[in-house]
Amino acid sequence: MGFGLNYLGKCMSGDRIVLVSNYTQTLDLFAQLCRERRYPFLRLDGTTSISKRQKLVNRFNDPSKDEFVFLLSSKAGGCGLNLIGGNRLVLFDPDWNPANDKQAAARVWRDGQKKRVYIYRFLSTGTIEEKVYQRQMSKEGLQKVIQQEQTDSAKNQGNFLSTEDLRDLFTFHENMRSVIHEKMSCIRCQNYDIVVDDRHDNVSEVDGVRSTNEVCRSDQEDIGGFAGISECLHKLKSSEKQVGTPLEEDLGSWGHHFFPTSVPDVIFQASAGEE
């Protein structure tokens, strides 16, 4: 995320970012990062008075102000805020309740938004974070997304944790690229030839990575980055392409990317290339 903020700050695209977390300690770390890198930022959490909240929102949405980052507690500001001044939002940690994450993500995707919106969800594969997201889908009765066949009784138990499920929550699957993707038995990716070695860490071999100047020029010439995205899409493998206009929970129809450099987002590509 630090690399992403770095590239986004260097570009003159006017994009602003909202960082959402469930924990004030995490927001403290974000604030420290912003101060160290001199990013103008605002913060709204449970300690922010009601009278001050709207002033913070108005300042962030004002294009004449130089605010760049908005730090938001999902519990304090997950509902009712209109943050259309930002068009990039990061859900840094998943919530057990999927409604909370959806409410937080909707802060920038609202009436009046004039830019292309990017929502990022950070999950460490094989860890409890990914399993929390998996439980989110279960709570919404979306087990079919990760299991091709289910009985009615299994569906009815989607909101309950068995002893085995509880044990699995605290088991780290270090050899899995994604627990959710494995359980989906994804047909689209079965023939995807993935070589797991150190070569993919050499970003100079990846065509999708561009320099900061190239990224900035692209964003300046193309409002919203649509041309850059269109250019990238025709290079994608079939498994990396989105099928139609899927719902958020229809993971099988979204593009599946094993490397961040194939994601059609120039800022994301550049930050991944830096790593």
Image (tube, rainbow, N blue to C red):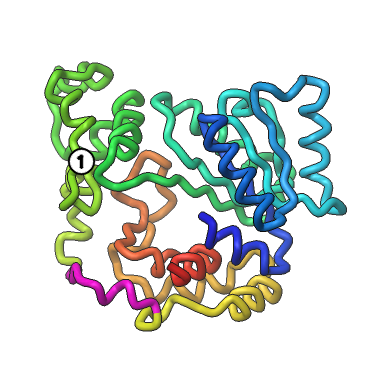
Find residue 25 and report its image quarter.
top right
Instruction: Between residue 226 and residue 217, name the one nearer to us.
Output: 217
Whole-percent x and y of residue 212?
A: 59, 76
Judge left or right: residue 181 versus residue 80.
left
Residue marked by disc 1: 172
Q: Is residue 64 above or below residue 198?
A: above
Q: Is residue 143 above or below residue 41?
A: above
Instruction: Between residue 223 and residue 65, name the one nearer to us.
Output: 65
Judge left or right: residue 262 versus residue 46.
left
- Residue shown at 23% from the left, 54% from the top: 177
Say what amino acid the circle numbered 1 marks: Phe
- Residue shown at 39% from the left, 77% from the top: 203
Whole-percent x and y of residue 87?
A: 64, 51
- Residue shown at 73% from the left, 41% from the top: 42
Q: Is residue 208 magenta?
A: no
Whole-percent x and y of residue 5?
A: 59, 58
> Which residues are drawn in magenta?
193-203
Extreme right residue here?
64
Mark 1 falls on what kind of element?
Answer: loop
Image quarter (top left, top right, bottom left or bottom right) of the C terminus: bottom left
Q: Is residue 32 above or below residue 95?
A: below
Q: Is residue 52 above or below residue 111?
A: above
